[in-house]
Image (cartoon, rainbow, N blue to C red):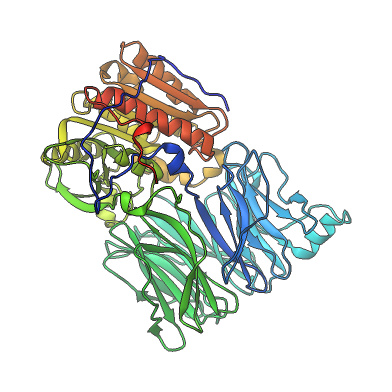
Amino acid sequence: MQKTWLHSTALILLGFACQAPTLEQEEIPVYTIEQFLNTEPIGGSAFSPDESKIMYYSKKTGIYNAYEIPVDSGDTQQLTNSESESIFAISYFPEDERILFTSDQGGNEINHLYVKNLNGEATDLTPDSTAKAQFYGWSYDQQSFFYTSNQRNPQAFDLYELEISQIDAIENNTATYQPRMVFENPGQFYPAAISEDKKLVSLTEPITRQKVNIYLYNAETGSTEMISDPNDTVAYSPQYFSHDGKYLYFLADKDSEFAYLSRYDLASGQMEKVREANWDIWYAYESREGKYQVVATNEDGQTQITIYDQETGNQVSLPNMPEGEITSVNISDSERLMSFYINSPTSPSDLYVYNFETGEYQRLTNTLNPEIKQQHLVEGEVVRFSSYDDLEIPSILYKPKTASADNPAPAMLWIHGGPGGQSRLNYNGLMQYLVNHGYAIFAVNNRGSSGYGKSFEMADNQKHGDVDLKDCVAAKDYLATLDFIDAEKIGIMGGSYGGYMTLAGLTFTPDEFKVGVDIFGVANWLRTLQSIPPWWGAARESLFAEMGNPETDSAALYNKSPLFFADQITKPLMVLQGANDPRVLQVESDEIVEAVKANGVPIEYVVFEDEGHGFVKRENQIEGYQAILEFLNQYLRSNTEEPTAEMIPSQ
């Protein structure tokens, strides 16, 4: 890893005797970034063929590797030992303990699929170095798996099937790599659900974020049929084919602010609404033999899971679980066990297993660094404020435990990625690190964010850097009314689209925010939209419809690009960038940094040579996040001092 610093201002942590906070007569420690990042991020879950173990991926070693743990609890076993590239575990093989995993090179997002053989060797199953591959699931007969790849056409993802028998032959050097193409994509489609008999493939055709058509491809006849109404402006999303072969289940928001679950009768062609809520249904799926249906709803920034017993039609009554949102539900093939994660703002994701027969659950991991006490972390509070036009903006406020009217805290607006993302009530190590060091964080779900209805989501279309930025200014004004916030010390930060909003805030409203922290944000929309990776394919046009087309809307895109108005930036700025980022190219950050330097404004720049669009290596996160804190201490806190590591009480 190579780090690049520009404007190497000395950043010094100054110690002082602060008023000691109390929590049940206990002093609240000031934790280091190393302590926060020694928490173990994990994800994924796959049952072994005998359902005695669950495989997942973990960053215990500093980058992601595959691990497994017994379902009745016990010691974990590391399955892969990469020291350079993160490995994301996908699945065991159906009848043995070979494993599938995916990995890219330095964050370039060109993922390949690999099998780790029983002898410990790994084989690249998608060896084209220029092609991106994505796993699409095992066939119902469990003799093959499906995946998509853009090896034929960089702008189109074809659907392939690879037989286990061929993988066996490849491992034994008795055959060459020859997957079967199931669907040759003319370019505008994305494969979705596949029927159990392999005859039907559902396809989506994104036109805009609000208009996504749905098709059925018949693998026997080669015909493709549009089953949604071409006149509808509806976002359709296929979920699964039913086990009985009668229906395709899908999400839609026709005549509704929110997505609901419907089904398409494959025989009659009739569509029927099945389940709905006052929030978006996010996803749904059916267990292997059709006994259970899992439905996930996005309720005000948290996932709510409902499980239905399809034999009785009743909800499955789950035991009282720990507080937090349940995510990543995975029901085993026997339909006897269910793995899932629980996550909250004060607790990172932990893996659990539930037994449908006994009605009992068990926690399998404890990922929070034991040096950190959960009660020292801060729960997020959902709050709403009125923006410039009285539109209500949902947000999440993290108040430092030390903040009060007598000790007001500096604050940072936190703007999510996207456009169209959402800040949610879950654990974020960087957020908790800054809050623990005395900074209030206000995660703003400005108009254009998902999860609050399609009208809210569409409200910033082709108005980015304008109406969404006005929401951020209104968020800053709202913070200034709170007695525990120092109204003169409010900054803005975010990654990707949130990085763009940071740059837009410092450029187009130069007197509103005290500082900005831009994490791989867009500075020049013309270049970014012209350099979209080819594998985005049909999604390019959808993004153009939302942001503007660089060929036809160049003037508007120029006017919302901070790079061309960087001479207006007068407040300190920090920029962090991955050199391998395929979405926001490093040149975006290079140029904005050079432009701001010309203003004589304090500017800090950190480039990680082995990262992409998001920093996954722990050593880089430690370096980058600590640099953010030091920057804020110098330029936002400025005339006050931040506790030093020596002040941390013994644990």
**Quarter of the figure with the N terminus:** top right
Q: Residue furthest bottom?
A: 312
Q: Position of residue 623 (x, y in %)?
A: 47, 30
Estimate the x, y position of residue 296 in percent, counting from the top left: 39, 67
136 is higher (above) or lower (below) than 332: above
| Residue in the foreground of this view, choosing between 539 and 279 | 279
Q: Is residue 392 above or below residue 627?
A: below
Does the image show residue 561? no
Which is more toward the observer, 522 or 489? 489
Residue at screen point 30% across, 48% down? 449
Q: Quadrant of the rendered structure where residue 309 is?
A: bottom left
The residue depicted at 35 percent of the width and 60 percent of the height is: 232
Which residue sits at x=33%, y=38%?
Answer: 434
Task: Give whichever of 230, 378 is nearer the camera.
Answer: 378
| Viewer can see residue 376 | yes
Q: State the image quarter where residue 259 is shown.
A: bottom left
Image x and y of residue 179, in percent: 74, 57
Question: Closer to the camera, 224 or 120?
Answer: 120
Residue 617: x %, y % from top left: 54, 38
The number of numbered discs placed on residues in the rendered structure image is 0
Residue 599 relative to residue 228: left or right: left
Residue, x 44% and y 25% (percent of image)? Answer: 588
